[in-house]
Image (spheres, rainbow, N blue to C red):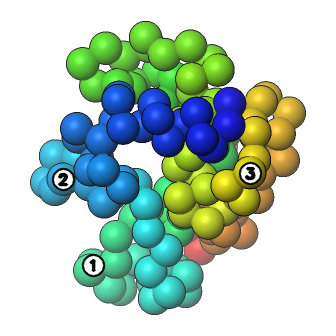
Amino acid sequence: GSVAEGAVLFQAQCAMCHGKSGEGMPPAFPTLVGRDPRAEQFLFATDPTLVHTIGNYWPHATTLFDYIKRAMPQLAPGSLTNDQVYALSAYVLAANDVIPDTTTLDAAALRQVRMPARDRFVRDDRTGGPVIR
């Protein structure tokens, strides 16, 4: 899925809840897009005004694909094809300046995406899940 394909899909499937540019519609629909420079320091625990977005908080791009595939769109979860989910993932990642807007994603390319916050999470040996350090 390409960023351009994802942009069209986002407007048709996601903008009604997440806003035209992914700015969110609080309190129910979170902000998806944004790279606040203050958030790059990962001070979410000490500054509650920082917004968690895909670009400044998520550790893995593959979880974005998984979440969209299983839970979106809200009124018809699981209705998107894999190609549509790759395109939406590409669009949201490009909107967050994580990947170039010329990128096309598939399973292999998605696994290669390095998220800006990836090194802020470490494995919790007690549960096997991620924790913030």
Element type where label 2 sits in the image: loop
Disc assigned to residue 48: 1
Residue placed at 56% from the left, 46% from the top? 91
Residue placed at 16% from the left, 46% from the top? 28
Which one is in front in this view, the residue at disc 1 or the one at disc 2?
2
Element type where label 3 sits in the image: loop
Q: Residues within 10 Å of mark 1 (few under 14, many from 20)?
A: few
Element type where label 1 sits in the image: loop
First in sequence: mark 2 or mark 3? 2
State how far apart marks 3 and 1 are (Cα).
Answer: 34 Å
- Tell me, yes or no, whether the two marked residues, 2 and 3, touch with CB atoms within 8 Å: no
State how far apart marks 1 and 2 are (Cα).
Answer: 18 Å
Q: Residue 45, percent across and down?
A: 38, 78
To which residue does mark 3 refer? 102
- Give the quadrant of the N terminus: top right
State how far apart marks 2 and 3 are (Cα).
Answer: 28 Å
- Side (left or right) of 44 relative to 119: left
Q: Residues within 10 Å of mark 3 (few under 14, many from 20)?
A: few
Viewer-proximal residue among 90 and 121: 90
First in sequence: mark 3 or mark 1? 1
First in sequence: mark 1 or mark 2? 2
- Tell me, yes or no, whether the two marked residues, 3 and 1, touch with CB atoms within 8 Å: no
- Give the quadrant of the C terminus: bottom right
Q: Residue 99, percent across and down?
A: 71, 58
Q: Residue 51, percent across and down?
A: 34, 70
What count of labels does the image hold? Answer: 3
Which residue reaches farthest left? 27
Q: Amino acid at mark 1?
A: Pro
To which residue does mark 2 refer? 25
